Amino acid sequence: MKEGFRQAMAWLHTWTGLVFGWLLFAIFLTGTLAYFKDEISHWMQPEIPARTLNAEASLTLAQDYLQQHAGGASRWLIDLPDARDPGLTVRWQQAPAKPGERGRFESRTLDAQTGAQVQGRESMGGEFFYRFHFQLQMPYPWGRWLSTIAAMVMFVALITGIITHKKIFKDFFTFRPRKGQRSWLDGHNAVGVLVLPFHLMITYSSLVIFMSMVMPASILASYGNDVEKFYAEVFPASQNPERLNIPVSLAPMAPLLAKASEQWSGGQTARVTVNNPGDSNASVVLSRAGDRVVHDFGSAVTFNGVSGQLLGSTPVQPVAMAVGGTFYGLHMGHFAGPVLRWLYFICGLAGTAMIGTGLVIWLGKRQLKHAKSGVMPFELRLVEVLNIASMAGLVSAVAVFFWANRLLPVSLAGRADWEVNAFFIAWGLSMIHALLRPGRKAWVEQLALAAMLFSSLPLLNALTTSHHLGVTLAQGDWVLAGFDLTCLGCGLFLAWAAWKMQRAGNTVRVKKPARETPRPVTIEQGSH
């Protein structure tokens, strides 16, 4: 019975991993890239200059700009610059034309030091990877549902993997290189055990994030169809008070930053929201940055916009919400400093590698059965093509996305959409290429292409902008320099992988010589 249970778990682990493996690989890879989405966005909009941070001065500049250009708006939103995102972003919501309508939003990016408007090139930047990893570029809510189902499958695969590999921790210390399938399995086990706590946390927390979507029974039972009332009670800081239409000047907001920091025991402000600017019922909501606390569920302090009086702060949340917020914070990693963020990134790559090696192992075991005949069944050939396109092809598509950012004309209409289109076109072409080329050759060629694209990105950056390594390293701009250096490192690793794949294909197995007939042994007299 015990062995039968383990065999059932092994079957479940194998087939859930295969059916959802290609989707999970894409979700993990893009989610891993999203840990540096601000840095990616900065590289993809090099026109936005990095300045010495001064929150009070930046907020004053933003308030002056909005009073001049959006005095009649119903709401202002100001995103203050930080070490990762140098732009001072201001947005405002126009007053609705008719009662019940939602006002249109406008957005501008300002120089955090001068307050002048900066015209950065249109690009989704790192936000594309962040959105794709849980929306899959699908209409709402289908992408979120599919990614949540994939997360549940991943959680099942992790649990069944632990049950199946009863010697998994012992196997963690075993790695046999150049042993074909055995080496892939050793690598799969080692990577899986090494970052198992991260895998469990990131998978379970993704289910917690979308809990209200996938398990809405309790909300519907308490609130019926009035779901907005539920969110209004959960996030009271998001409420917009009514406008009294009594013109009153807004008080300077910069002094409020220090008052909010006192409420948070030294925490900093990430966003400032002004409701009803220029009205006697104006309020200013300061939202805490998530760079110092794991719990990341929107701590905020509200002030009267005219007098500057403290009106209230986000109430102490129930234990359930505090736990949910902690899981959300752990998943997003906003609290992580540079070192911990790199650790998140490495663990994410390890999870991606674990999924990829599992797909390779599944196919390799079944290919061995047909090695003598030399004929691969259609279903195995299909898996092989999907493996190549979903892994090597996806990596190449990511590089093409960055190339498109530098090569597309800055004035091109719908430029951000064309960057995304380039990503999917490259990904689709990788599928066609994998169909037309033999398996190993397709692997080598696509890995080599990805290596060339990534390793040459710093050169392309130097040819198309003035923010190349020669400048960024000298200025100590480690965000831009780090991006170029990371791309160069990825290119070298992919080139090594292509070389290893090519070398393995060229290895000629030497046929063992026929066993010789043993020569008779003559025992001399007197010998023993």
Image (cartoon, rainbow, N blue to C red):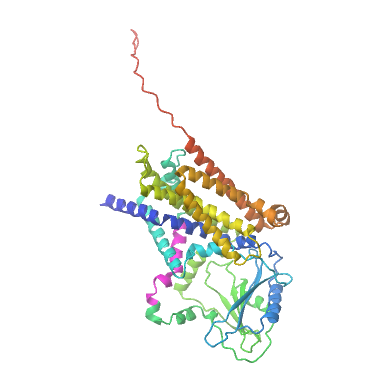
- Which residue is pictured at 72% across the width and 52% down the height? 470
Magenta stretch in the rendered image:
198-218
Q: Is residue 255 left or right of residue 489?
A: right
Which quarter of the figure is the C terminus placed in? top left
Nearest to the observer: residue 124 or residue 483: 124
Where is residue 218 drawn, in percent x and y? 38, 76
- Looking at the image, residue 334 sits to the left or right of residue 521; the answer is right
Q: Name the foreground residue: 290 vs 240.
A: 240
Name the image quarter holding residue 20: bottom left
Residue in the image at 66% along x and 76% along y: 258
Q: Is residue 507 above or below residue 17?
A: above
| Extreme residue toward the top, this view | 525
Q: Is residue 213 magenta?
A: yes
Q: Nearer the viewer, residue 420 or 216?
A: 420
Using the rendered image of the protein, determine whether residue 456 is visible from the camera's viewpoint.
Answer: yes
Instruction: Classify 226 as above or below 289.
Output: below
Q: Which residue is rendered at x = 44% and y = 49% of the image?
A: 385
Q: Can residue 192 be seen in the rendering of this structure?
A: no
